[in-house]
Amino acid sequence: METFAKLFERFLVFVYHCFDRIVIQGYLPLLTRPEHIVHFFRDVHGLYPITPQVLAKRTLEYRGWVEGYARNHIIPILKAEKGVSKEDSVRPHLQRMERRNQHGVYCIFTSMEMGSTFSSKMPQFPTEDPNYRIIRRVPSRYLHYYFYIRDSEIGPLAMCVSTYLPFQTTYYLNGHNFIEIELRRQGVSFRKDDNAFLATPDPKALQAAADKLTAATIEKRLNYWSWLLCPKFSEKDRKAVNTPSTRSNTAATSFSNGTSRSTRFLSTPAKWDCSAWPPIKSPTSSGCASPNGYAASCTACSKNSTMAITYCGSTARTWWAVCTRSSAPSRGSKSVSTG
């Protein structure tokens, strides 16, 4: 590309750059190791021995909440089928929401996938503590939720939430969707083929829209959807694990020309925020959410559960840790813990 630019620089009218498919991974730093799990259940909640039923309790609560949320907001829950593209399955639902000019969750996919979780097993030999259990982090195949979302600022995105501790999340979004929204908002015409902008009468506006996609913009929107859709921790939970920690992660971004970039980051998670979960207005046209839709999760959920997120932005390499407030994805957007 650099050689091409040197040879044909005088023929170039304008140049814009944008991350095409952005993949962001989120996790709970202080619930990623077996010792964290032992402290959380035994010392904080007094649940001992830590049996498989104890570990699965929050999973069942979160699944119940998701089913209630989908029912209250009339969101279809589809089962991923082998050999069938998720993006093809959700496209009619996205198009329907675009015609109505609505924003919010328009489809939920359930998918049995491999992920990391914790197991509880009896020791092979007798121990002094009859309640002693071996807690290990193991790969396992379990349910994942893919939330397909149409956002008012960054366009279509998808968020995958694993339903077992440590409730890892993955976000898929597309920088070109953000640019398209910005150009339409400014009334700038353009010609676009899939993710590529082919022509526009105002190249400067296109460049400005590409440069406007920042870490802060993405952070703000992912904060909201994570707060709304991810499982929660109660105030007691957050206070119990509010200690400094660092974790590293990788954000991989692929470009429309087929190349990819992978960058490693280091972070410190943000502080836990303590507040009760207030009633919120549904992002769709369904109006205010019914209290019953949230009761399936917990009665004293928090606005924020600490979740570290890595991001590789279109400007400099940027890393942040955020308090979240609250698959794979469509072509237009490649984008826990109950109390």
Image (spheres, grey):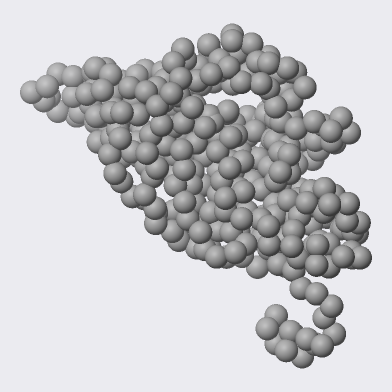
Residue 54 lies, with reference to residue 305, above or below; the image says above
Q: Is residue 251 or residue 325 the one in the foreground?
A: 325
Q: Residue at 65% across / 15% down in the picture?
A: 289
Picture coordinates of residue 261 (x, y %)? 57, 65
Picture coordinates of residue 41 (x, y %)? 28, 23
The number of numbered badges drawn on the structure is: 0
Residue 325 lies, with reference to residue 72, above or below; the image says below
Picture coordinates of residue 90 (x, y %)? 77, 35
Q: Residue at 73% across / 17% down in the picture?
A: 287
Which quarter of the figure has residue 137?
top left
Q: Quadrant of the N terminus?
A: bottom right
Picture coordinates of residue 127 (x, y %)? 11, 25
Q: Is residue 42 or residue 8 the one in the foreground?
A: 8
Q: Residue furthest bottom?
A: 7
Q: Does any portion of residue 164 appear in the rendered image?
A: no
| Residue 106 left/right relative to 297 | right
